[in-house]
Image (cartoon, rainbow, N blue to C red):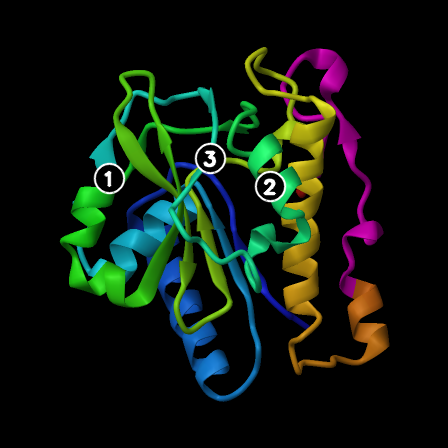
Amino acid sequence: MVNGVLFTGGWAKTGLYYEVVERIFKKILKKNDAGDHFPLYAICLGFELLTMIINKDQNILESFNATDQASTLQFIENTQIEGIVFQRYTSFQLYLHIDFDAIEINRQYGISPERFEDNQNLTSFFKILTTSADEDNKVYISTVHAHSYPMIAFQWHPEKNAFEWGLSMIPHSEDAVQVTKHVANHLVSEARKSLNRPPARLVLNNLIYNYNPTYCGKAGKGYDEVYIFT
């Protein structure tokens, strides 16, 4: 019933979670190699896990002073936006609203362009789309796209602009929310290309709409709504 995968943010870099993510990643590679356009989005922890899995090194990451920091995305020179997550922007919108506005929130770990470029496993799999800088002006890679697969990894949180309110530094401007929408719409457009067509009844029985969200925004817990499974 799956047409694509999202590796979310979080904290589990070792143990069973790492092992399951690695197995799913290998299945995604296999599906694409077999001719099924099967996308993967990896956000924050997902970015970190992909970096470790592809490089086969759990110590590849570096520390950055960017925890809960709103920053900007700086595009690599001559970046071609056709066919990537940012293609829904016009050139003017792209550079006006992403290069110059603080629209994204980051985390502590990442990888510098220098370490990335020195690593053949990473450079052969990913191309760098954007970089960002931490509070000490240390540059890290913030967005990458696979050369041969519909896979994009974000070392930032495009979803927080629209859906998380627990931190005052998270930007909620119209431009910031538009970034959330563009990133989400691109994932859906990629998933539509998947060849998988499961039975409609099976899909309906497993949609998230079968469950009730719980509103927690009033309690100041950060997220507007959460799903609680027991």
Q: Is residue 227 magenta?
A: yes
For marks 1 and 3, give the CA distance.
14 Å
Residue 46 image point, x, y percent? 42, 48
Q: Is residue 230 above or below residue 71?
A: below
Residue at 67% x, 75% y is 193
Q: Is residue 174 magenta?
A: no
Q: Which residues are magenta?
A: 206-228
Amino acid on which the number 1 mark rests in the picture: Ser
- The numbered mark, 2 or 3, whose residue comes first in the sequence reads 3
Give the quarter of the figure containing the N terminus: bottom right
- The numbered mark, 1 or 3, whose residue comes first in the sequence reads 3
* Residue carrying label 3: 73
User: Which of these two is toward me, 77 or 46?
Assistant: 77
- The residue at the far left in this view is 118
Q: Is residue 180 above or below residue 30?
A: above
Label 3: how many Cα within 10 Å (few below 14, some 14–19, many 20+): many
Q: Is residue 200 left or right of residue 190?
A: right
Residue 103 image point, x, y percent? 57, 27
Residue 217 image point, x, y percent? 73, 19
* Residue carrying label 1: 112
Label 2: how many Cα within 10 Å (few below 14, some 14–19, many 20+): some
Q: Is residue 183 above or below residue 224?
A: below
Q: Is residue 102 above or below residue 97?
A: above
Q: Nearer the viewer, mark 1 or mark 3?
A: 3
- The numbered mark, 1 or 2, whose residue comes first in the sequence reads 2
Give the quarter of the figure containing the C terminus: top right
Amino acid on which the number 3 mark rests in the picture: Leu
For marks 1 and 2, give the CA distance.
23 Å
* Residue carrying label 2: 94
